[in-house]
Structures are given as C-alpha cells and as structure tokens.
Amino acid sequence: MYMGVCDRGSRGGGLLNQIRSLIDRIEELNPNPLPIVVRSLDYPKTGKTCDLLAKEIISKRKGRRTTIENSDWRRMTALEKFREEHANNQFFDQWLLSYRPLTSLPSIRAILDLDNPPQLPSDQSSELPRTDPSDSSDVPAKESSGPSPLTEDKKPTGDIDIGLSRLSTQTKVLVNSQKLKRHAAFLGGTGSGKTTAAMNVIEQLLLDGIPAILLDRKGDLSCYAHPKTWSDSLNGPDFQLREQRRGQLQQKIDIAIYTPGNPEGRPLALPILPTGTSLLAEHEQEKLCRCAASSLVGMMGYSNKGASSKVAILFHALKLLCKQSSTATTLSKLIESIDSENSELVSAIGKLDVRNFEKIVEGLESIRTLKSHLFLEGGESLDAERLFGINNFASPQKTKLTIINLKFLDDLEDTQFWVSMLLMELERWTKQSPSEQLQGVILLDEADIYLPAMGKPATKQPLESLLKRARSAGLGILLATQSPGDFDYKCRDNIGTWMLGRIQSDTAIKKMKPLLEDCKSDVSKKLASQELGQFFLASEGDVNAVQSRCSAILTTQLSGTELLEAVECQKE
C-alpha cells in the first residue's frame, strides 16, 4: 500500500500533477503497491483529474480514494493528547481495544478497507430479538471512574433513570420521558461516554414501549442487530445487572436494520417526495417540494449563481406531480415530467427559460446513473410507520428498534441527501399523526454533520424544521456529537435537555457560550475536567452534575461483512 496526500486545488492543474507524481512513484517501486489517494477537499466530479483517478488509480491499479474530513483530523490529533494523559492508566489498553478510536473513523476504515475483511467462518447465531419478517462506543469495557451501575430499584412509570447525582450518590436523577418531546442533545469529546448515555435513555424507552430509530454512520450502533451482541458474555461495569436488562430487551424489541446504498443488504426505496404528501395542506406541500428541489440541485453541483432558476423549475414540477397523484414521487417520474415539457409546467414557471429543462433532465439522468444505489425503486419503501413499527407494520407485544446504517453510502454528500429525505418523510408523518404523548424517538449520531455551525448541507433546513414541529406529533429527536465545536447552537431554543460531558477544546466551549449562558450556574470551566460518564444535565436553566447510567449493551464496531450477516439473520 502506498498513500499519497493530494490536497492541492483542482484548478490550474495542481491536483492533477500531484496524482501524476503519485503514479510515477508507484511505477518506480517493485512490486507496485496499492495506491491510496487522500485529501481534505472534495474530489472534482468531471475533467482530466476525475478521468485520471478513475482510469489509473481505481480501474487499472485497483486503488482507492478517500476524503479525510476535518473532524477526523481533529480526532486523530486529540487521540495523541488523550494517549499522553492516560497511557499510565491500567485500563487504557483495554479501552483502546474496546473503543478502537482510529479504526472507527470513516476515513481510516476507507483507507484500510476495513469493511471488506477476508471472509472467516461464522459462529452459530443465537436468537435475535426480532419478529420482523422481511462514535463506536465512547465507553471502555472497564473503568474505575465509569458510569454508575444499573440498579434493580423500580423507577416511576414514564421516568428515565439518567444516573446518580454527583453531589449525593444516593439520589437518582430522573427525567420524565415526555420531556423528550422537546428533544435532547448529548455532547462530549472522545471517551466522554455520550454514546452509552444516549443508549441508556433509548433502552429504557424501548422497555416502556416507545419505538426508536438509530441513524448509524460508523457501524457501532448496528451491533444491536447482530446475534453475538445477545449471546456474548458481558463484562465491564455491573455486567450482571446489564445482563438482566439485556434479557428484557431481547424479549421486548423487534429489530430491523437497513443498509441504504447496498442492495445486497436491506436497502430502502427512496422517493423524492413521500407517499401522502398530496394529503398535506398546500403550504406544507410547497415546503417539502422546495426542500426536495434544493437538495436535488445541490447534488447536481450547480453554483449558487445558476441554482435558483433550476430550483424554481424543479419546485413547480414536483408540485404538479404532487397534485396529480397521492403515491410517492420517484426520480423516474420527475425526469419524465420535465422531459415531456407538458403545458402545465411550462405555464407554471412563467418567464423562466424553458431551455433549462434539458439541462435539468441531463443533471437528473446523471444522478440516476451515478447514484442509482440511492434511488432504488420497488421493495420496501421509506415510510415512518414502517420504521416505527406502528399501525400496519406493528408486531404484537413488540417495540420496534430500527437501525439505519449509512456507512455503505459513498460520501458525505450522499449521506446528507439520504438523511434529508428521511427527515422530510418524518415531517410529513408528524403532520398526519398528531399526539400529546411521546410516540417515538430518533437518534442522530454525529449530528454536527447534519446541523453544522458553518455551511448549509441538504439536512440542515429539514432538521431545523423538524426540531420545531416534531413536538406536535410526540416525536423526540436525540442529537449526539463528539465535535461540539462544529454544532449549530442556534437551535438551542428547540432542545429542552442537554447532557454535557467532557469537552476539552477551548474553541468548542467558546462556541457553546450561547447555550451555557442559559444555565443558572456556570459550568464552562468544569467541562474539561469531567471524567468518563460524568455529565452536566441542563434543562430549563437548571443544572445537575450526574454520573450517568451504563447502557446494557456497550456498542462495538461492526465490519461490512458483519453488518450483512445481521441483515441475513433477519431474513431467515
């Protein structure tokens, strides 16, 4: 393997020359190594550089290219400091083995191709908790200062046992589950325990009959769907009590795992507009049409200057299709509608240039060809009721846990587009399913990529909208990030509960100032010194210092092969 960092700009031939130099160096070596091209910027989608990468690196030499995002660089740098501080801890090596902080990074996994390991004989599978027919963990396995133990004491119905007060270890800190209608955020750097704290909440909700959706970009949350999770011996904090909860979960939950972007797994058919959009009020229809149009134009790569007219034409085309049928609007239907230049659409766009139709159709056809894995038609459709396991998709006496594993999607842009479609489907559902009670929750791990402080990805507007509107349907949104400095705190008024773990970056703490100023006590200087599992629980201005409970399942990274094994177990 020979890796070259090619970070020059694509204009002026800088990037092209870097790749040529990499190829020349490979030719000098004997035997020729596998070439890996890495950069921090997006790769050009057309032109000589794109052709050279495809022909000489990927096709001829079976090499790979990947983008190392800034957040991954920061985590790698943070690990070095973390290692210096904790290398003498007797549990540090075990923590490294359990957490795998480097090999859990998407860029490192792509460079080393860890999701496609050699096929090994599989062990016999144990029963999965299912009836479905069709940050790896931030917490080490053992740590003396780890999360506080599960207890057998019963808690009031509807209350979530967050943990024990650090001021008095005998005092439980409870949060009523109905407060999650105003959403929650779990913030903490690497090794803070935020993933386990979030899953502790979700496990209790599942046992109380509240379904959950997990968006899993790294592959660690997907371990809930693998047989070994339910049969392996437990260790770490209070394994006996965790084993008791694991047994309860195994009897209670119905797990489904989906793999968008991988037809060999269990993909979901992705419409441009979901079924039932036509049943919404006109202004709600227009909102979804506008959001979908913007996302599509973003995928086509148009600059801001040329985007507005194309967004407008797509908006009118989607609006007409929405009126014509109550079924889902697919990419094929949209292309056919614009390509036909029907009179209604021509009339609707007013003085906009009809010649744009051809360019838009070409752009949509390119998406359909190059991103066919995103727009599969037929099979199981993206449907909120399916994901929550309610109404026609309900399993008797079971609570649905749906895991959507996003690691098979090619890049961040694909991930953000797919998630934007999911968020629009959830908003459609909230309009048609109002409820005063909590009906379900969704966890978005690595939330900073969906709601970043800088930039406006396809997910930002629909997520901001859902945070405002989901409460009316009893939908709780749980956001988790280990990059709190990259998160947009303008949404803070729509999030009622905050779990603030160890955050050592001064820059991140400064960016959190608007949030911290809402707290009645100043905790900004205490965030960096918190230990594993320690959080400040902030809600409505009140702040409690908490030692969080440990989830029954300590999440572990699954390879691509193990993920497909989990899917196959559901099909049996």
Image (cartoon, rainbow, N blue to C red):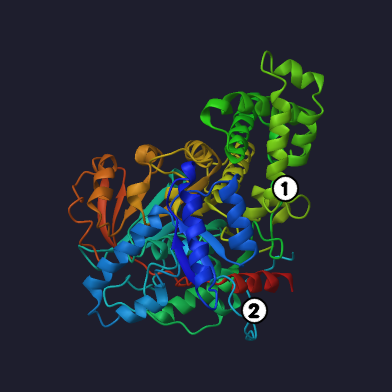
Closest to the camera, between mark 1 and mark 2, is 1
Quarter occupied by the C terminus: bottom right
Query: In the image, is 355 to the left or to the right of 137?
Result: right
Residue at the outermost top position: 351
Do tag 1 and tag 2 residues touch (Cβ < 8 Å)?
A: no
Element at label 2: loop
In this orientation, which residue lies closer to the viewer: 17 or 86? 17
Residue 165 in the image, given as x and y percentages of width and height: 26, 62
Q: In the rendered view, tell whether residue 5 sits above or below residue 335.
A: below
What residue is at 63 percent from the left and 72 percent from the top?
566
Which residue bears the numbered disc 2? 127
In the displayed structure, would residue 499 be above or below residue 474?
below
Residue for point 57% across, 25% down: 308
Q: Position of residue 139 (x, y in %)?
A: 37, 70
Cα separation between marks 1 and 2: 39 Å
Q: Which residue is mark 1?
A: 369
Q: Position of residue 135 (x, y in %)?
A: 43, 63
Is 381 on the left-hand or right-hand side of 212?
A: right
> Left or right: where does residue 441 sit relative to residue 120?
left
Please, what secondary structure does the residue beneath circle 1 have?
helix
Query: Is 324 in front, or is 348?
Result: 348
Residue sitting at x 25%, y 48%:
507
The residue shown at (47%, 36%) is: 468
The local crowd at label 2, few if under 14, some if 14 to 19, many if 20 or more residues have their Cα within 10 Å, is few
| As drawn, 463 above or below 75 | above
